[in-house]
Image: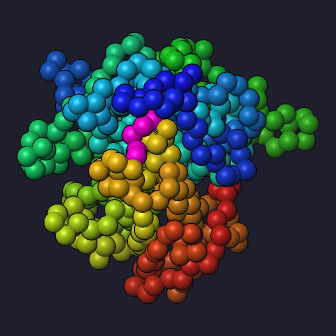
Amino acid sequence: MSVEHPGTHAPLLPPLLPAPSGPHPVGTRAFHLTHPSRPDPWSTDGRPRELMAQIWYPAAAAVGAPARYLSPSVAALVLDAWADEEEEFGPESSAVLAGTRVHAYESAPPVLGEPRPLVLLSHGLDEYRTGLTALAEELASRGFVVVSVDHPYDAAGVEFPDGRLVAHHEPEGLQDGDDSDLLARYLPTRVADLRFVLDRLLDMDDRLIGLDSRLTGLDNRLISSGDDLPQFGEDQSPNPGDGATAPSPKLIDPARIGVAGHSLGGAAAAETARLDPRVTAAAVLDGSLYGEVLTTGLALPFLLCGLTPPDPEDPEVLAGWDRLWPRLRGPRHHVTVPGAGHWSATDFDALAATLGLRGPDDPDAEESFGTLPSGDGIAVVRRVLTTFFEAYLTRNPTGPGAAAHLADGHAPQLALDALPGAVSESVSESGSASVSGAASASAE
């Protein structure tokens, strides 16, 4: 399919996300959760909080249909969030974004065996859960289970299995510089969302390897009903009679849980790490930081990945980073990506040019995507994030990139400085800087 962007004559073809580099093919599935005891803070009738989430995982084989990126209705809301006041996108443009080609396979059978580390992802304000697909597919191809959570009313758009579509609700007063609603409602709601999803994943993990006949289809993705999670077919398990080891009943290792987020999702990741002792490593991908974590700090491995340089006219944007850094009592890593922009951590770094949203005459393009060529920013961020989580969530103590490579017995000697396009400062618990030099490894 090809379409024309408003105001141009250039045809748009469904774009292709960058391929993951790990050894595993990737499977994915969306699922629906309801938190019956928690009223939705945007509901006027006491409706319980409902969520949509996406799971990616290392697959046993590249089988099944390629996963769908977005539904056209959600894609339309995503494009509306990007559009200027005088700009409109038609259904053809929405169809192009929705048809973005990904590398995961719908409901492919997972690799079974030892439980794997989990990484929770939280999108930025007015973004969407699959907007972090390039990061998720990379991590999953390297052995991680990854779950990205939509935050309804906060996200650009969320579609539920019954067809309900929830559009973005702008925080009250935000346009006038008032972030009180952001702090009082949006941030704690995100943190509660992430912790609830983690609860359900761990509670139902033994069923992630089974077969659930109650799954129903939505836009070629399988969505579970009610509170239940997706389950995978037992018929894909190795046969012990053939000499294979019987699979573990668990897909996720509860002792190896990371959380990462972009922009407001990064603030949610930091607060989740503060409140939830199950989180063992956390990462922030650009954006302002808020919450009590700026006062209490954290005592776990932490990554700050900066994509936009400090703005001397608005120093408060990154003031939280300066407050948090000295309060990080575990191994801490501060990485900057020169030439990147705020959205370089998202799929739009690779998609925007094809969609006509990034051009040399766009005054906002440099702030959004920096000066790096299309797709280069997300490529660097993928390497940074996988290097960090492989160091702190893998069980391979002798392989390159694993946590056994220590500086002063504390912080791993990560390969962050060796990554093209990244500049890093890594400090151990004792306060000494660590030196990079390890390559990355898969999360077996």
Q: Residue at x 58, y 74 (%)?
A: 418
41 vs 70, nearest the viewer: 70
Q: Is residue 244 above or below residue 391?
A: above
Residue 306 higher or lower than 413, as above or below: above
* Majority SS type along the magenta span: loop
Quarter in which the N terminus is drawn: top right
The image shows residue 424 at horizontal and vertical percentages of: 46, 75
Q: Is residue 385 left or right of residue 441?
A: left
Q: Is residue 234 left or right of residue 282?
A: right
Residues 113 and 338: in front is: 338
Instruction: Report whether 271 appears left or right of 434.
Output: left
Residue at x-position 21% and y-position 61%: 317
Across and down, in percent, residue 377 comes to 48, 57
Q: How is the image coloured?
A: rainbow
Q: Quadrant of residue 80?
A: top left
In terms of depth relative to the viewer, which is nearer, 392 or 218? 218
> Looking at the image, which is closer to me, 296 or 286?
286
- Residue at the spot 64% in from the left edge and 45% down from the top edge: 19
Tell me the magenta residue range: 355-359
Question: Quarter-wise, where is residue 56 in the image?
Answer: top right
Q: Quadrant where the C terminus lies?
A: bottom right
Q: Does residue 439 appear anywhere in the picture?
A: yes
Q: Residue shown at 53%/71% (left/top)? A: 416
Q: Quadrant of residue 163?
A: top left
Residue 356 part of the magenta-drawn span: yes
Let me know if residue 222 is in the magenta part: no
x, y percent for residue 281? 45, 61
Q: Position of residue 36 (x, y in %)?
A: 31, 25
